[in-house]
Amino acid sequence: MPAPRLGIVAGAGALPARLLDACRATGRETFVLAIERHADAALVADVPHAWVRLGALGSAIKILRDNRVDEIVLAGSVGRPTMSDLMPDGRALRLLAKGVLSGGDDALLKSVIKTLETEEGFKVIGAQDLLAGDLAPEGRIGAHAPDAVAEADIARGIAILRAMGAADLGQAVVVQQGVALGVEAVEGTDALLERVGPLKRSGPGGVLVKLPKPGQELRADIPVIGARTAERAATAGLRGIAVQAGGALLLDRARLVDTADRAGLFLGGLKQPA
């Protein structure tokens, strides 16, 4: 029996294209619901698709139903809009009336998934369910390994992210010699790396630590790194990147590892917390 038709709700970044490639490889039927002002037009050039405004939740649900979508995967980044930018329709207004906009991103995404599953009858799956081979393994991933100073910075980064996660804040922090040079907020990891470059201190470079928040809904927002992350980390003067084993996707892993190795960056998969 063939797998149900997959609806890829696509934002920005490389993840939606990676999911399409995976579905093509297995012959799975797909439909892309591309979010205006976020998804790349090239993504949908040769696949069944429709465009939808971010605040048009009712229209999005109707489009997915009309196109016989049974399972949904949320993929790619979407900047958190203001109410004036969002222009929510009636269905979105009912969701926002629950007060989720005043919480963090994870609270909002959990509410969206709950609405899609319990009220609308879709099944929401995670990108990692389709890309299990792209999940970060535990231990050293590339040619380089962290030294004692970097290990201490990683531990400091983990502590910072656990404290941030309790407030439903970002997934990433850059630490150099015990000092947090920057934490991720609404701007995303790429912008964080650009921001910390001028803040680099003398001595051993810092590390990027990127982890899921405690209790995070990974079906909606699993951490992702790729070759561009490694390039920007190197430009910022960092020495390595640490992610949670099984809790982050490594997109185009061969290119990512090659980029990191050439730049002298270590890549590490941290053991999952007990």
Image (spheres, rainbow, N blue to C red):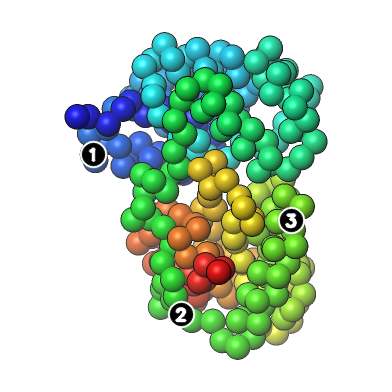
Q: Which residue is mark 2?
A: 144
Camera-side mark, 3 or 1: 3
Give amino acid for label 3.
Answer: Ala
Camera-side mark, 2 or 3: 3
CA gap between label 2 and label 1 equals: 34 Å
The vertical placement of 228 against 264, above or below, is: above
Camera-side mark, 2 or 1: 1
What residue appears at the point 32 percent right and 40 percent down from the top-left corner? 21
What residue appears at the point 56 percent right and 68 percent down from the top-left corner? 273
Give amino acid for label 2.
Answer: His
Q: Which residue is mark 1?
A: 26
Residue 259 at least partly seen:
no
The kind of secondary structure element at disc 1 is helix
The kind of secondary structure element at disc 2 is loop
The vertical placement of 226 against 141, above or below, is: above
Q: Which residue is mark 3?
A: 166
